[in-house]
Amino acid sequence: MAAAPLYCVCRQPYDVSRFMIECDICKDWFHGSCVQVEEHHAVDIDVYHCPNCDVKHGPSLMKRRNNCHRHDYTEPDDGTQPVQAGTSKFVKELQNRTFPSAEDILIRMKGEQVTTRFLERHGFNYPIAVTEMEGLGLKLPPSTFSIRDVEQYVGGDKVIDVIDVARQADSKMKLGAFVKYFTNPHRPKVLNLISLEFSDTKMAELVEVPIVAQKMSWVENYWPDDSFFPKPFVQKYCLMGVKDSYTDFHIDFGGTSVWYHVLWGEKIFYLIEPTSTNLALYEAWSSSPNQSEVFFGDKVEKCYKCVVSQGTTLLIPTGWIHGVLTSQDCMAFGGNFLHNLNIGMQLRCYEMERRLKTPDLFKFPYFEAICWYVAKNLLEMLKELREDNCPPPTYLVDGVKALISALKTWLKREATQPTSEVPDHIRPNHLIKELTKEIRYLEPGSGNRPVKTQGCGASSGTNGCPATRSALERFCQARRARRAARRLREQQQAPKVPTNLDILEQHTREVLKRLEVGPLEEDAAFFCAPFSAQRRRESRAPRYFTRGLESVKTDLREDVSGHSSASDVESDSDSPTEVKDELCLEAKTTCRHPASFSGFTLHPSSKLAKSLERPTSPSTEEAIQGMLSMAGLLCTSKPERPASTPESWWSNSSQCARQGGGGTMDSQGNSSSEAWDNQGFPSPEAGYQYGDPSMSPPLHPSKRHAPNPPPISNQATKGKRPKKGMATAKQRLGKILKLNRHTGWWLLLLLLIQEGGGCGALKEVDGGHF
């Protein structure tokens, strides 16, 4: 493959993103940045000589200026050509003209008065001028903020678009070069910078847009964070223009409303109301070949002059046609925003841009995509207002009707022009159908038309109706609340992995319910209350029984190592006091009949139920897991062999214990340790079903899952002592509970101990009842 040709003194291949100029002598191409030729200077060069040819043939030859009223100043001045917009002669004539004062249509307000509620009640149809900034919510740098400060915050290497005013043509240059031009007393031409969006720079922290613009903005309220399309940044612009800069008549992209604040300097706005006649005239003027030769203000009935001085903020509504003259060196800040108040006008302006074939660079980014997002949210708003029996404001109904028509048009156009901006998660036909249905509810004669409640108006009225308040603000708050509620419902509906305590509590509740021997209220209250010295005296339980219960509770709070040996387990029972307590407990709990639990029940509001939500200590968790395994409540697979039926009350009351025990028990109710040596506990992610008779106890924590493990004979290992650090689950459980039998009794005891305030009192022990 042939190597790419190299150009310029830097000998680099062609780069489409960099401006280049051709030498008229050697015919080589050079980067403008390498030979110090700016793009806006190149149009003034008639014959260019590169640095190499400059030595032999002399400097480049510049174009000769023949006029001061045409974009092409080389044209001969024969007096027959009209003046074109932006030229020096045009600016002088414009400054000498008279126009109707904008005071006829301008609304002057204080910053605190410009609110979404005011605009929704009275509309946003005329420009608003604010001189007292307090309450507007606009944050700006001080008036001493200079163009060099902008360079410091944004960066001098940032490439920007500037307008050559005399030619009304744009070109690119670096911000550092523009700052150098701006600060130079001798300016060979007039350059204007109006498109520096700085939301992604450090300067963004210095500026906050007006509160009303934030609350009404579609982008701020409806653009989802997970959108496939990049979020449009059109809210923060810095405009820097030298004296005599001029921008010809235009409508801001997408029919957006705009706010301007002059930090220092002065600007003059020429405002034209967007009536149907004026919009038709504007479209015809924009598409005419001699557009630059005709001053659009002369074609309409009235063009208002509005002088915006330093410290003044101007808000221009949707669709207003305006031209701007910079009468002094000026720095201003501004931003654009779409909103609900003039949806129809915004859509009309967008369709006009399409007919005029406006380049994408000068259109609102992803305008159609945001309209789909807005339609989805407005559908929810209309449903909420209908459920509240309150009609939506008129501007919203008219806006939704215009939006439905536009969405239908875009869908039809998709068939021939597949440039879709429909978000993936939106069903366009269904959305249009639902919006149409909501509008039909509001039509006269519809049986589902919302009923006006007392003090409720459709578009204006008292504060008694939700629709008369700030609909956007209320809906945004409700939408945030619905999102939070939706996330909560999703979490609740998601398959929740039950914790060991959940399984233990559920199983115990079912066993006690099966017994059908509910206690008296005073017994239940006494039994579930925190244990105290006074209650101990009232109880008929002997003190040695209480001491044994407290001893077990203390042991449960201790951390027990997962690698304790059998000898460690046995040695822990050598304390005389503990042996005595253990013997007393065994003596008083020999009865295993279900009736022995007639004094116990669980109430959902009891401290026990609430304590189940608390995290447990490692030792308690091990005890719970051991109990669940012995009861057959933690299971992963079907047993390979049938289990013998235990003799304890637990197996008599639980089908799971009969079929999923996974081990054998001797005549005294003790489970053989061999069955536990080859089993373990699963991870919480396994998603176990309570009471599944097809499940068997899982593997012991000290074991590891191995592929195709060899079969283990219980007879071969019976009676053998485990190796050091390989204590069985039964022995580890014994270290915690100091007791290896009467599983069901200890299960209930463990539930009592889990109460945060202490264990419950045992009311009676005579005759096998407690």
Image: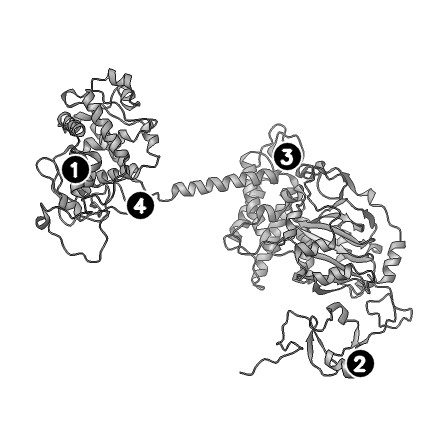
* Front: mark 3 or 2: 2
Q: Quadrant of the C terminus?
A: top left
Disc 3 designates what residue?
468
Is residue 553 toward the left or the right of residue 201 in the image?
left
Q: Residue at x 64, y 44 (%)?
A: 214
Vertical side of 358 occupied by 469: above or below = above
| Mark 3 or 1, nearer chain start | 3
| Mark 2 or 1, nearer chain start | 2
Q: Residues within 10 Å of mark 2 (few under 14, many from 20)?
A: few
Q: Position of residue 207 (x, y in %)?
A: 67, 47
Disc 4 designates what residue?
684
* Front: mark 4 or 2: 2
Type of amino acid under label 1: Ser
| Mark 4 or 2, nearer chain start | 2
Report the Cα–Cα distance between label 3 and label 1.
79 Å
Q: Is residue 583 visible?
A: yes
* Front: mark 3 or 1: 1
Residue 380 lies in quadrant: top right
| Mark 1 or 4, nearer chain start | 1
**Colour setting:** one colour
Type of amino acid under label 3: Thr
